[in-house]
Amino acid sequence: MMRRRAMLLGLASLAACTSPTPELFTLAAVPGPPRRLWARSVELRRIGLAGYLDRPEIVRAAADYRVTVASNQRWGEPLGGMLDRVFTEDLVERLPGTAVFTEAGAISTAPDLVLELDVMRFDTDASGMVVLLAQVAARRADARAAAHAETVRLTATPASAATRDLVAAMSTALGALADRVATLLAAA
């Protein structure tokens, strides 16, 4: 009887030590203004991602030489793959009549335009604003000339400090980047 009671107490203490199931979040595509391109297809190369962002936990801030992550709140899929997927969805929304596909996807064809994106920062600053800092390059697939490249810094304000609102603001910033990229592609 004593052994059984000790075993039950041990199991109860183990159950108390387990962490709760994490909350999972995903970025979402947002609507944007359509732009017509001459190109029939655009290939988005695998998006480059700063190493400090490449983790399951949601990075809330990187300041004062420290990275702050959301406790028990994680991305529902690896952030790099999610950026590829959601940014492609954002571009499909903005580029009607143009096939947009990712380098890492199952579909491939000879593209008219090639798009490269490197995300250097995607977190909040000291004031709580989401900051998206990225380098973008676009070129004709058959061009020997250098790609048109630019650095883009965008911000978005979360509605509150809740992680859900942070992720919504991040989705908004990513959509604003898609707006800029659609304009860049139209000029390529």
Image: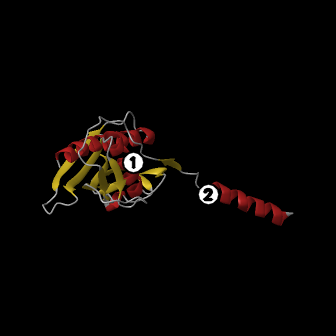
Between residues 169 and 99, which one lies in front from this camera angle? Answer: 99
Mark 2 vs mark 1, foreground winner is: 1
Q: Residue extending furthest left?
A: 145
Residue 89: image quadrant is: top left
> Where is residue 182 drawn, in percent x and y?
25, 43
- Residue 5 vs residue 141: left or right? right
- Residue 105 vs residue 1: left or right? left
Q: Report the residue at 51% width, 49% height from top.
A: 24
- Residue 182 vs residue 93: left or right? left
> Where is residue 159 drawn, in percent x and y?
38, 33
Is 95 located above or below residue 84 in the figure?
above
- Real-space Cα separation, disc 2 to disc 1, in angstroms: 36 Å
The circle on residue 86 is 1
Q: Quadrant of the N terminus?
A: bottom right
The circle on residue 17 is 2
Q: Can residue 63 be seen here?
A: no
Compare marks 2 and 1 and give the one earlier in the sequence.
Answer: 2
> Where is residue 17 drawn, in percent x and y?
62, 57
Between residues 152 and 159, which one lies in front from this camera angle? Answer: 152
State the SS at label 1: helix
Residue 49: image quadrant is: bottom left
